[in-house]
Image: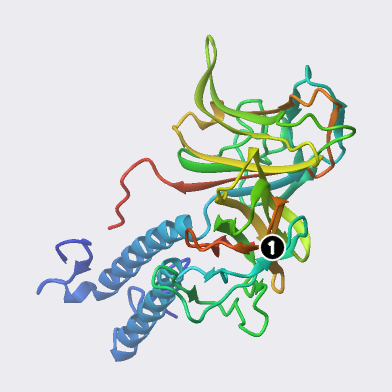
Amino acid sequence: MNFTDILRLPCPGENDYAALPIYMQRLAEDIEAKMLAQRAAIALETNPPTLVQLGPQSAIGPFGTSSIAQLTLQNNSTIFSNYTITPPGSFGGRPQLSPSPGNTFNSAGVWYIGFCIIGYVAVGAVTNDSNRLVRAQVGKGTSSGTTTIESFGRRINAESTIATEYFTGQTTVMIDNEFTKYSVDMVLTHANAASNMTLPANGVLFWCTRLGSTENIEVV
Amino acid sequence: MPGQTPVLGIRYPLIGETVDATSFANFANDVNSAVITTQALATAALNRKECLVPMLTGVAITVAVETTVTFTNSGLENFNPFRDNDNMFNPASPTQITINTSGVYMIVAKDTGVDSFATMTSFRCLVYKNNIAQFGERRNEQDGSSNSIVETVQALLRCEVGDIITVKFLWNGTGGPATVSNFMSPALHVYRVCPL
């Protein structure tokens, strides 16, 4: 049996004609294996692991300037996901925004994650130029605690005549092969001394999607 | 009965079967079909559903009145490209794009802002789906600046066929009506990240 130079597909030599069925079976199986590898690589591009959540189901607050609101979205806030996490942990394998390790990412790679705060509202007066802040931290659990891999967020200032705010933030982060140790810790604060603030139900849009591998991939 | 591979069904003769022209033809046709399918997948990956449509600049926007932005695919300046490979933009309905293939989309309202006002205290750009606010940002000018704010907002949204995407501006300050700024290259860009 001979083989092609690059893909190593079999082709019969002059002594192989009696074994044509075996040759054709092996060729068919090799073609199938290589083509399925190509399709898997294409699917990583056209159907990457993606999660979109809109929550929480109930409003948070009203809360004052000394409070920190933890933004954690549960299964019932998921409006789209096309992957599961392994091991499934406490959420049955469903990915979500969570400060607990292992609940968000399912694989190593470069991930794009982001959020939007929708309608964060002062229940009373607005302190002019006071800030509203989301601080997010992608952390990796270690034996000695949590190591911050990426910090990102958004801080805007309010206008005294407007009570309701919208703002967004996003980042890319590289997740290594210990992806079950990663978490996303997102908190919301404000400095509106004139009144408390409320994040309404469905006031957080969160998303993450895998952009690509951290390794060079070649399909042959 | 020939054998076949388990997934793609490429047929091959079994030992003891006569290998004839039909055996080779079946084999070649099955490989051909598999290659065509794979090529279609590759083409789709290289040509993902997308619409990049510029915003029509110079359109008046009254202070404190939220106004829907108008898009255009004609008379464009050379730094404003137009691309639409899924018929999402219809010039007859220039204030919206319509999703024609379901999926999760990246929605980007880029380089948005207004000009021609006296002072600005804030500018807000919100992206709507089916007339419900989805995401955006309001930026505050602490000292009532006379300079325009330029902002880009983006997010991933789940979209069904027929969903309508619009962009609305709201500014506060004095003077005006302001106009949609051409200081940068304001545009709406949507592209499909993955199927539902």
Locate the C terminus of chain A and report the quarter of the image it occupies.
bottom left
Q: Quarter-wise, where is residue B60 in the image?
A: bottom right
Measuring from the top left, give residue A65's x and y in whole percent. 78, 20
Q: Image height check: is A186 above or below B147?
A: above
Instruction: Using the rendered image of the protein, determine whether residue B12 is visible from the camera's viewpoint.
Output: no
Instruction: Using the rendered image of the protein, determine whether residue B125 is visible from the camera's viewpoint.
Output: yes
Q: Kindly identify which residue carries mark 1.
A: B177
Please report the residue visible at 59 percent of the width from the left and 40 percent of the height from the top. Answer: A169
Q: Image height check: is B59 above or below B157?
A: below
Measuring from the top left, give residue A80's x and y in whole percent. 69, 53
Q: Please indicate whether residue A52 sits to the left or right of residue B49 in the image.
A: right
The colour scheme is rainbow
Q: Quarter-wise, where is residue A42 in the image?
A: bottom left
Q: Image height check: is A130 above or below B170?
A: above
Q: Please indicate whether residue A203 sits to the left or right of residue A176 in the image.
A: right
Measuring from the top left, give residue A88's x and y in whole percent. 66, 35
Q: Residue furthest top?
A: A144
Element marked by disc 1: loop
Locate the N terminus of chain A and report the quarter of the image it occupies.
bottom left
Q: Residue furthest bottom?
A: B21
Measuring from the top left, give residue A129's x and y in whole percent. 70, 31
Please report the residue visible at 78 percent of the width from the left and 16 percent of the height from the top. Answer: A66
Chain bearing mark 1: B
Please report the residue visible at 31 percent of the width from the left and 56 percent of the height from the top. Answer: A219
Decide which of A70, A38 is in the foreground and name it: A70
Q: Please indicate whether residue B185 sits to the left or right of residue A220 in the image.
A: right
Q: Residues within 10 Å of mark 1 (few under 14, many from 20)?
A: some
Amino acid type of the residue that numbered disc 1 sits on in the rendered structure: Pro
Decide which of A118, B11 is in the foreground and name it: A118
